[in-house]
Structures are given as structure tokens and as C-alpha cells.
Image: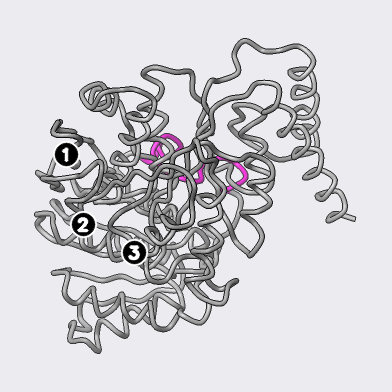
Amino acid sequence: MKQLLLNILKYILRTLARATLARYSPGIVGITGSVGKTSTKEAVRTVLAAERTVRAPAKNFNNELGLPLAILGDWETAGGAFFWLKVICVSMWRLIVKSKEYPEVLVLEYAIDRPGDMKYLLEIARPHIGIFTAMGDVPVHVEFFTGPEAVMREKARLINQLPATGFAILNIDDPLVMEAKSQTRAQVMTFGFDEKADVRVTNFSNNFDGKSGGIACKLTYGGSIVPVRIDRALGKAQAYSIGAAAVVGLIFGLNLVRIAEALSAYEAPAGRLKLVRGIRESFLIDDTYNAAPTAMHSALETLKSLNAKRKIAVLGDMLEIGKYTLEVHEGVGKLVKKMDVDMLVTVGIRGKLIAEAAIKEGMSDKIVFQFTDIYEAAEFLETKIQKGDLILVKGSQGVRLEKVVKELMAEPARAKELLVRQDAEWVRRKGLYESAE
């Protein structure tokens, strides 16, 4: 019965969303990839908001329910019979009486879990501009596919089905992403660090002085060069996001200087390599939104690039990678040994594989600690953290390591403002390794 009601709801939302797009005809920027979708969405929204009315959903409304919800309105939460009834009624009213507030541009994420998901989403909303952020060697959700190539093909549908008058924006540094270039009729533009990129990122640096931090880089296009600085966020992933957003801005007629000015207002989403002040004058690098192998490697490389009294890595399971689980967790453990980490703390049964591989690679077992409960890990860290420490916290969504960050942050009263998954429904939901607090 529950599944029947869900199918009915999906049908109604899909129908209303398609009717709404026909009624209002907004431009659609669609974003796919295994990592970086939400950061790119926010960067694109920030750039386009300088010149257009734009909607980019506040939450990750990117699946069979979320995508139509993002089209139908600027909803901040979802769930419950009364909520869905409200959405349906408001949406029908906006079809009858045209709203002057409907945005000119929608910036939407297209997420997939299983084969056929992208086809379903594209039947609801076909973008005019498609961004393919990154894939990596072993993408998240690969457990439901025959392999990484099958995941790539599913995600690449978004690029394949762009109209001939559209634009495909591709990460030039990712070979799997660039395979989509030959599969689209749209005009292709690229972003990345490669010198052949249409919008090239250069002079990148992670910066941390013990009190604050962020990234700095330059964007180059057609002989023009502009500097960009993003505060309170770290990692090359942010540079890729602003590079992709710059391409979108150029397509919409903005020049590089105007784009850089707009990006000064960009605020990276919570849980994506965000700096958060920790207890005892430490700093946390909160990367708890999710974890895929490529993103895990990037986070560790970011930690290595920064100066700090001590560096601590708190790493949890990477989920939804199926038969690659053993290989990628052991690979992370081997990498940790090379990253100048002063302490490794792992959470979860898969996290244990990281710890064991790090020790096997030569890391002292005196600085490696393993836990299967997030609160036990947090309590341990509370006794170990010292002034000047820099602590990376990263794991998949199901591990819920943002709850560890909340225990260790200097201002837990600001958790709802600074951390991911802080609405009432998520706070009540238990993670894989969460006992009673």
C-alpha cells in the first residue's frame, strides 16, 4: 500500500512539474557527476543571481521526488501528507494563475542510484545547459551497476540529451567525463586545471593560518585573468565548482570580471570541506556530507597541503561502492600513511579496513584508533584534541559523522547553521554506528 501511494505521488509531481515547465519556460541548468554537484549548484546560482532571477533548491532535491519538487517551488523541507497536499494545491494554483515570481533560470541537480534513474529525471526536465562535474575511478552508487563505465553512461545521458542549441560543460581533467564530448550535439565548453580548458583554473592554493582559511585561485578565459578567493572552504573541488560556474556565467553573457565579483558572495555548502572552529582553539575540516574514493583522496591531499600543529584524520565508511569496498578502503589506508597525518581515527567496519591498511603500510599503531560507535569516537577525540590541531572529518552519509563534528565544534549552538542534516527528521534518524548518546 505504501509503495502504491508513493507511485501515485511520483506520478502527480511529475505531471505537475512538466506542466509548470511548459507554463513558465525557464532556462534549466542541469548538473550531474559523482562528486561536486551541490557545490557547483551553489556556485552557479551565485553567479547567475547577479543578473537573473534564479532558483537552486536549498536542499538536495535531486531524485524522483526532489527534482519535481525543486521545479514546483522553493521548498526548504519535505515530508508528511499535509506537506505533499500543500505542494499539490499550490502548484495547481500557479498553473491557473501565473506567478510573476517564478524564476527565469532553474539550477537543478540530477542524481542517480540505479540504472534508468537519469532517463526518468530527464523525462521530467530536459536541461538547456548540462554540467558534468567529475566521476573518478570508483564512483559512488557503483554497487547497483556493472562497473564505473555503466555509472558514467547513465550520468552521461544528461549530456547526450542536450539540444543542439544547448551547452555541455565538462571537467577536462576527468577522462571519463570527457568521453561524453563525442556523445552530444550541444556545444562543448570545458573547465579545469588543464591548459586546454576553456575556463582554466591556475595559481590554486589552500590557505590556513591557524585562525581562518580558504582557497585562492585565478580564472583564465580568452586572455583575461581574474583572481578569486573563497573563504571558510578548502580543496580543489571548490575550484572546480567555481570554474564550472564561470562557464555558465559566460554563456549567459557575463564577463569574467563580473563573474569574479559575483563569486565573492559564494558560500560553499555545509559539510563540503568547510572550516569550523573546534574546541580548545582547534579547527575542524567538516567534509561529512558524503564520501566517494575520489573525494576521500582529495580531502586527505587538502589536509596535507595545510600547516598546523597537528593533523588528525577522522575517517568513516565509504558506502554504495559494492564489490570495490575492500580495494578502495585499503587504498585510502595506504594513502593516509603518505599524508603526514599525526593521528588516524576510523569509524565503522569499513573504516577498520582503512586503519588496518595504514598500519600495514607502516603507520604506527600507537597513533591509529578504531571505533564502531560515533559517540565513542567523539568522546575519545575530546580527550585528545589540543590547541592548534586541524581535524579532517569525512565519511559517507549513513555514518553520520556530522554528529561527531557537533560534539567537537566550539559553537554547538550554531550546528543548525553550520552543519549538514540538522533538520528535525535527520536529527532523529540514526546512523549506522550510533548508539544511544
- The residue drawn where x is 24% and y is 51% is 236
Q: Nearer the viewer, residue 174 or 188?
A: 188
**Residue type pointed to by label 3:** Pro
User: Label 1: how many residues lie within 10 Å, few (<14), some (14-19) or many (20+)?
Assistant: some
State which mark lies toward you, 1 or 2: 2
* Residue bearing mark 2: 302
Crowding at label 3, few (<14), some or many (≥20) Cα neighbours within 10 Å? Answer: few
Q: Mark 1 vs mark 2: which is more N-terminal? A: 1
Residue drawn at point x = 63 percent, y = 39 percent: 125
User: What's under tag 2, amino acid-wise?
Assistant: Thr
Q: Amino acid at mark 1?
A: Ser
Mark 2 or 3, nearer chain start? 3
Q: Which mark is residue 170?
A: none
Q: Which residue is mark 1?
A: 212
Identity of the residue furthest to the right in this view: 1
**Which quadrant: the N terminus?**
bottom right
What is the x, y in percent for residue 301? 21, 62
Q: Which residues are magenta?
A: 412-427
Real-space Cα separation, disc 1 to disc 2, in angstroms:
15 Å
Distance between mark 2 and mark 3 Cα atoms? 22 Å
The residue that appears at 55% across and 40% down in the rendered structure is 163
Q: Position of residue 388 (x, y in %)?
A: 13, 51
